[in-house]
Amino acid sequence: MAETKHLEVTLDTHVESVNLAEEMCVRVAEASGFNEDECYRIGMAVREGVINAFHYGNQEKPEKKIHLAIDLTGERMIIHVMDEGKGFRLTDVPDPLAQENLLSTSGRGIFLMKAFMDEFDVLPGRTGGAEIVMAKRLPMLGSPSSNGNGNASSSDAAPHQEA
Amino acid sequence: MPTLFATTRQDGVITIVDLSGRISLGEGSALLRKTVRDLLDDGHTRIILNLGDVNYIDSSGIGELVSGFTAVRNRGGELKLLSLTKKVNDLLQLTKLFTVFDVYNDETTAVGSFK
Protein backbone atom coordinates (compact mmCIF):
# COMPACT_ATOMS: atom_id res chain seq x y z
CA MET A 1 0.00 0.00 0.00
CA ALA A 2 1.39 3.40 -0.99
CA GLU A 3 2.47 5.78 1.73
CA THR A 4 0.39 8.95 2.18
CA LYS A 5 2.32 12.14 1.52
CA HIS A 6 1.24 15.25 3.38
CA LEU A 7 1.96 18.87 2.62
CA GLU A 8 0.62 21.76 4.70
CA VAL A 9 1.03 25.51 4.45
CA THR A 10 -0.45 28.50 6.28
CA LEU A 11 -1.31 31.43 4.04
CA ASP A 12 -2.03 35.06 4.77
CA THR A 13 -5.48 36.42 4.00
CA HIS A 14 -4.29 38.17 0.88
CA VAL A 15 -5.11 38.05 -2.84
CA GLU A 16 -1.63 36.73 -3.61
CA SER A 17 -2.34 33.66 -1.46
CA VAL A 18 -4.94 32.63 -4.04
CA ASN A 19 -2.32 32.51 -6.80
CA LEU A 20 0.23 30.85 -4.52
CA ALA A 21 -2.17 28.07 -3.48
CA GLU A 22 -3.19 27.44 -7.08
CA GLU A 23 0.43 27.24 -8.28
CA MET A 24 1.43 24.95 -5.44
CA CYS A 25 -1.39 22.49 -6.01
CA VAL A 26 -0.93 22.49 -9.78
CA ARG A 27 2.74 21.56 -9.29
CA VAL A 28 1.80 18.70 -7.00
CA ALA A 29 -0.87 17.58 -9.49
CA GLU A 30 1.62 17.67 -12.37
CA ALA A 31 4.13 15.67 -10.35
CA SER A 32 1.36 13.15 -9.57
CA GLY A 33 0.72 12.48 -13.25
CA PHE A 34 -2.43 14.47 -13.90
CA ASN A 35 -2.70 15.76 -17.46
CA GLU A 36 -2.96 19.43 -18.40
CA ASP A 37 -6.77 19.55 -18.34
CA GLU A 38 -6.96 17.88 -14.94
CA CYS A 39 -4.26 20.17 -13.55
CA TYR A 40 -6.29 23.15 -14.76
CA ARG A 41 -9.40 21.81 -13.01
CA ILE A 42 -7.55 21.07 -9.78
CA GLY A 43 -5.91 24.52 -9.90
CA MET A 44 -9.24 26.21 -10.48
CA ALA A 45 -10.90 24.28 -7.63
CA VAL A 46 -8.10 25.21 -5.21
CA ARG A 47 -8.25 28.80 -6.38
CA GLU A 48 -11.99 28.92 -5.71
CA GLY A 49 -11.53 27.28 -2.30
CA VAL A 50 -8.96 29.86 -1.25
CA ILE A 51 -11.03 32.74 -2.67
CA ASN A 52 -13.90 31.43 -0.56
CA ALA A 53 -11.69 31.36 2.55
CA PHE A 54 -10.21 34.78 1.77
CA HIS A 55 -13.45 36.57 1.01
CA TYR A 56 -16.33 34.79 2.75
CA GLY A 57 -14.57 32.90 5.54
CA ASN A 58 -11.95 35.35 6.76
CA GLN A 59 -13.83 38.40 5.44
CA GLU A 60 -10.51 39.64 4.00
CA LYS A 61 -9.24 40.31 7.55
CA PRO A 62 -5.41 40.22 7.41
CA GLU A 63 -5.04 38.94 10.98
CA LYS A 64 -6.76 35.69 10.00
CA LYS A 65 -5.05 32.80 8.24
CA ILE A 66 -5.92 30.31 5.52
CA HIS A 67 -4.72 26.74 6.06
CA LEU A 68 -4.06 24.64 2.98
CA ALA A 69 -3.19 20.95 3.15
CA ILE A 70 -2.63 18.33 0.46
CA ASP A 71 -2.70 14.58 1.07
CA LEU A 72 -1.51 12.24 -1.63
CA THR A 73 -2.69 8.72 -0.98
CA GLY A 74 -2.02 5.92 -3.42
CA GLU A 75 -5.36 6.63 -5.05
CA ARG A 76 -6.32 10.26 -4.55
CA MET A 77 -5.11 13.81 -4.23
CA ILE A 78 -7.05 15.29 -1.32
CA ILE A 79 -7.05 19.04 -0.72
CA HIS A 80 -8.18 20.76 2.47
CA VAL A 81 -8.79 24.52 2.65
CA MET A 82 -9.57 25.86 6.13
CA ASP A 83 -10.50 29.39 7.11
CA GLU A 84 -10.94 31.13 10.45
CA GLY A 85 -14.43 32.43 9.83
CA LYS A 86 -17.80 31.33 11.13
CA GLY A 87 -18.31 28.33 8.87
CA PHE A 88 -21.20 27.64 6.53
CA ARG A 89 -23.48 24.84 5.43
CA LEU A 90 -23.59 23.65 1.85
CA THR A 91 -27.37 23.58 2.00
CA ASP A 92 -27.38 27.36 2.56
CA VAL A 93 -25.46 28.06 -0.66
CA PRO A 94 -27.78 29.29 -3.45
CA ASP A 95 -27.81 27.40 -6.74
CA PRO A 96 -25.97 29.62 -9.27
CA LEU A 97 -27.75 27.88 -12.15
CA ALA A 98 -31.21 28.87 -10.92
CA GLN A 99 -32.75 31.39 -13.30
CA GLU A 100 -33.00 34.05 -10.59
CA ASN A 101 -29.26 33.72 -9.81
CA LEU A 102 -27.83 33.69 -13.33
CA LEU A 103 -27.07 37.41 -13.24
CA SER A 104 -25.54 37.27 -9.77
CA THR A 105 -21.99 38.61 -9.72
CA SER A 106 -20.87 36.04 -7.12
CA GLY A 107 -21.72 32.62 -5.73
CA ARG A 108 -20.20 30.33 -8.38
CA GLY A 109 -17.10 29.16 -6.49
CA ILE A 110 -18.63 26.18 -4.68
CA PHE A 111 -20.35 25.10 -7.89
CA LEU A 112 -17.04 25.17 -9.80
CA MET A 113 -15.23 23.19 -7.08
CA LYS A 114 -17.93 20.53 -7.18
CA ALA A 115 -17.82 20.42 -10.97
CA PHE A 116 -14.04 20.17 -11.24
CA MET A 117 -13.32 17.64 -8.48
CA ASP A 118 -14.46 14.04 -7.96
CA GLU A 119 -15.39 14.56 -4.32
CA PHE A 120 -16.36 17.68 -2.42
CA ASP A 121 -17.59 18.45 1.08
CA VAL A 122 -17.60 21.23 3.66
CA LEU A 123 -16.94 20.34 7.31
CA PRO A 124 -16.70 22.35 10.52
CA GLY A 125 -13.04 23.36 10.52
CA ARG A 126 -10.49 22.56 13.25
CA THR A 127 -9.61 26.27 13.24
CA GLY A 128 -13.18 27.27 13.97
CA GLY A 129 -14.29 28.15 10.46
CA ALA A 130 -15.12 25.99 7.47
CA GLU A 131 -12.99 23.20 6.08
CA ILE A 132 -13.43 22.49 2.40
CA VAL A 133 -12.33 18.97 1.53
CA MET A 134 -12.07 17.99 -2.11
CA ALA A 135 -10.42 15.10 -3.88
CA LYS A 136 -9.43 13.90 -7.32
CA ARG A 137 -8.63 10.32 -8.19
CA LEU A 138 -5.05 9.89 -9.32
CA PRO A 139 -4.61 8.90 -12.97
CA MET A 140 -3.80 5.27 -13.57
CA LEU A 141 -0.50 4.60 -15.26
CA GLY A 142 -1.11 4.17 -18.97
CA SER A 143 -4.62 5.63 -18.84
CA PRO A 144 -5.65 8.27 -21.42
CA SER A 145 -5.65 10.99 -18.77
CA SER A 146 -2.07 10.34 -17.66
CA ASN A 147 -0.46 11.06 -21.01
CA GLY A 148 -2.04 14.39 -21.82
CA ASN A 149 -4.39 12.94 -24.42
CA GLY A 150 -7.45 12.69 -22.21
CA ASN A 151 -10.78 13.81 -23.58
CA ALA A 152 -11.33 17.29 -22.18
CA SER A 153 -15.04 17.17 -22.91
CA SER A 154 -15.62 14.05 -20.84
CA SER A 155 -17.41 14.28 -17.51
CA ASP A 156 -15.31 15.88 -14.80
CA ALA A 157 -16.34 13.31 -12.26
CA ALA A 158 -15.92 10.29 -14.53
CA PRO A 159 -13.47 7.75 -13.14
CA HIS A 160 -10.25 7.24 -15.03
CA GLN A 161 -10.32 3.96 -16.87
CA GLU A 162 -7.54 1.52 -17.20
CA ALA A 163 -6.04 1.14 -20.66
CA MET B 1 3.27 42.13 -13.87
CA PRO B 2 -0.34 42.81 -14.92
CA THR B 3 -2.41 39.69 -15.43
CA LEU B 4 -4.71 41.32 -17.98
CA PHE B 5 -4.21 43.79 -20.81
CA ALA B 6 -7.05 45.75 -22.40
CA THR B 7 -7.00 47.99 -25.48
CA THR B 8 -10.05 49.66 -26.97
CA ARG B 9 -10.82 50.61 -30.57
CA GLN B 10 -13.86 51.90 -32.44
CA ASP B 11 -15.77 50.48 -35.39
CA GLY B 12 -18.31 53.25 -35.98
CA VAL B 13 -20.34 53.51 -32.79
CA ILE B 14 -19.27 50.07 -31.64
CA THR B 15 -16.42 49.85 -29.12
CA ILE B 16 -14.28 46.73 -29.25
CA VAL B 17 -12.18 45.88 -26.21
CA ASP B 18 -9.32 43.50 -26.99
CA LEU B 19 -8.44 41.62 -23.81
CA SER B 20 -5.49 39.32 -23.25
CA GLY B 21 -4.35 37.38 -20.18
CA ARG B 22 -6.30 36.28 -17.13
CA ILE B 23 -9.55 37.71 -15.80
CA SER B 24 -9.21 36.60 -12.20
CA LEU B 25 -9.46 37.87 -8.63
CA GLY B 26 -7.35 40.99 -8.19
CA GLU B 27 -5.88 43.05 -10.99
CA GLY B 28 -7.57 41.24 -13.88
CA SER B 29 -11.12 41.65 -12.58
CA ALA B 30 -10.40 45.22 -11.46
CA LEU B 31 -9.08 46.22 -14.89
CA LEU B 32 -12.11 44.78 -16.66
CA ARG B 33 -14.42 46.62 -14.26
CA LYS B 34 -12.60 49.92 -14.77
CA THR B 35 -12.50 49.52 -18.55
CA VAL B 36 -16.25 48.96 -18.85
CA ARG B 37 -17.09 51.70 -16.34
CA ASP B 38 -14.83 54.20 -18.14
CA LEU B 39 -16.45 53.39 -21.48
CA LEU B 40 -19.91 53.89 -20.01
CA ASP B 41 -18.85 57.18 -18.42
CA ASP B 42 -17.67 58.31 -21.86
CA GLY B 43 -21.04 57.44 -23.36
CA HIS B 44 -20.07 54.19 -25.09
CA THR B 45 -22.90 51.71 -24.65
CA ARG B 46 -22.33 49.30 -27.54
CA ILE B 47 -19.44 47.17 -26.44
CA ILE B 48 -17.82 43.97 -27.68
CA LEU B 49 -15.36 42.19 -25.40
CA ASN B 50 -12.89 40.29 -27.56
CA LEU B 51 -11.78 37.37 -25.36
CA GLY B 52 -9.70 35.64 -28.03
CA ASP B 53 -6.52 35.96 -25.99
CA VAL B 54 -8.06 35.37 -22.57
CA ASN B 55 -6.86 31.96 -21.48
CA TYR B 56 -8.23 31.91 -17.94
CA ILE B 57 -11.26 33.17 -16.03
CA ASP B 58 -12.14 32.32 -12.42
CA SER B 59 -15.41 32.94 -10.57
CA SER B 60 -14.34 36.51 -9.86
CA GLY B 61 -13.79 37.11 -13.57
CA ILE B 62 -17.13 35.52 -14.42
CA GLY B 63 -18.75 37.82 -11.89
CA GLU B 64 -17.08 40.80 -13.50
CA LEU B 65 -18.35 39.81 -16.95
CA VAL B 66 -21.87 39.58 -15.54
CA SER B 67 -21.44 42.89 -13.72
CA GLY B 68 -20.31 44.58 -16.95
CA PHE B 69 -23.20 43.04 -18.88
CA THR B 70 -25.70 44.35 -16.32
CA ALA B 71 -24.11 47.81 -16.08
CA VAL B 72 -24.20 48.27 -19.86
CA ARG B 73 -27.77 47.02 -20.12
CA ASN B 74 -28.83 49.40 -17.34
CA ARG B 75 -27.58 52.26 -19.52
CA GLY B 76 -29.68 51.02 -22.42
CA GLY B 77 -26.74 49.46 -24.22
CA GLU B 78 -25.48 46.00 -25.12
CA LEU B 79 -22.33 44.10 -24.19
CA LYS B 80 -21.42 41.11 -26.35
CA LEU B 81 -18.62 38.57 -26.30
CA LEU B 82 -16.31 37.63 -29.16
CA SER B 83 -13.91 34.73 -29.83
CA LEU B 84 -14.06 32.63 -26.70
CA THR B 85 -11.18 30.25 -26.03
CA LYS B 86 -12.16 26.67 -25.25
CA LYS B 87 -11.68 27.06 -21.49
CA VAL B 88 -13.78 30.23 -21.35
CA ASN B 89 -16.39 28.70 -23.63
CA ASP B 90 -16.62 25.61 -21.40
CA LEU B 91 -16.97 27.76 -18.27
CA LEU B 92 -19.80 29.80 -19.76
CA GLN B 93 -21.55 26.58 -20.82
CA LEU B 94 -21.07 25.08 -17.34
CA THR B 95 -22.44 28.15 -15.56
CA LYS B 96 -25.32 28.54 -18.08
CA LEU B 97 -24.13 32.04 -18.93
CA PHE B 98 -24.23 31.10 -22.59
CA THR B 99 -27.97 31.67 -22.23
CA VAL B 100 -27.30 35.22 -21.02
CA PHE B 101 -24.53 36.55 -23.26
CA ASP B 102 -24.57 37.09 -27.00
CA VAL B 103 -21.46 35.23 -28.15
CA TYR B 104 -19.86 35.51 -31.62
CA ASN B 105 -16.97 33.80 -33.34
CA ASP B 106 -16.13 36.54 -35.82
CA GLU B 107 -15.90 40.27 -35.41
CA THR B 108 -17.83 41.29 -38.53
CA THR B 109 -20.89 39.32 -37.41
CA ALA B 110 -20.56 40.66 -33.85
CA VAL B 111 -20.40 44.28 -35.06
CA GLY B 112 -23.31 43.71 -37.45
CA SER B 113 -25.47 42.24 -34.69
CA PHE B 114 -26.05 45.60 -32.99
CA LYS B 115 -29.38 47.17 -33.85
Image: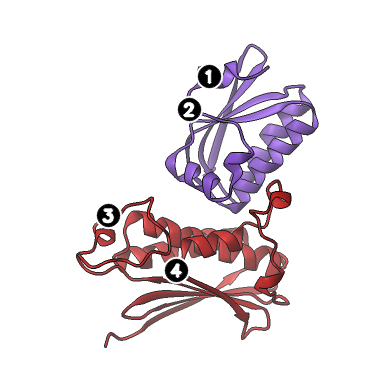
- Kindly identify which chain the residue marked by label 1 belongs to: B
Does residue B21 appear to the left or right of A122 in the view shown? Answer: left
Quadrant containing the C terminus of chain A in the rendered view = bottom left
User: In the figure, what tint was chain A given?
Assistant: red
The amino acid sitting under disc 4 is: Asp
Q: Position of residue A142 (x, y in %)?
A: 19, 65
Image point (44%, 68%), residue name: A118
Q: CA distance from mark 2 to mark 1?
A: 8 Å
Contact? badges 2 and 1 (CB < 8 Å): yes
Q: Is residue A85 visible?
A: yes
User: Mark 3 sits on what residue?
Assistant: A148
Mark 1 Cα-neighbour bin, 10 Å: few <14, some 14–19, many ≥20: few
Q: Are marks 2 and 4 on the same chain?
A: no
User: Mark 2 sits on what residue?
Assistant: B105
The amino acid sitting under disc 1 is: Thr
Q: Position of residue B34 (x, y in %)?
A: 69, 37
Q: Of the numbered discs in the image, which one, if any, rests on residue A161?
A: none
- Kindly identify which chain the residue marked by label 2 belongs to: B
Q: Position of residue A89 (x, y in %)?
A: 68, 75
Q: CA distance from mark 4 to mark 3?
A: 19 Å
- Residue A129 occupies which quadrant of the picture? bottom right
Q: CA distance from mark 2 to mark 3?
A: 27 Å
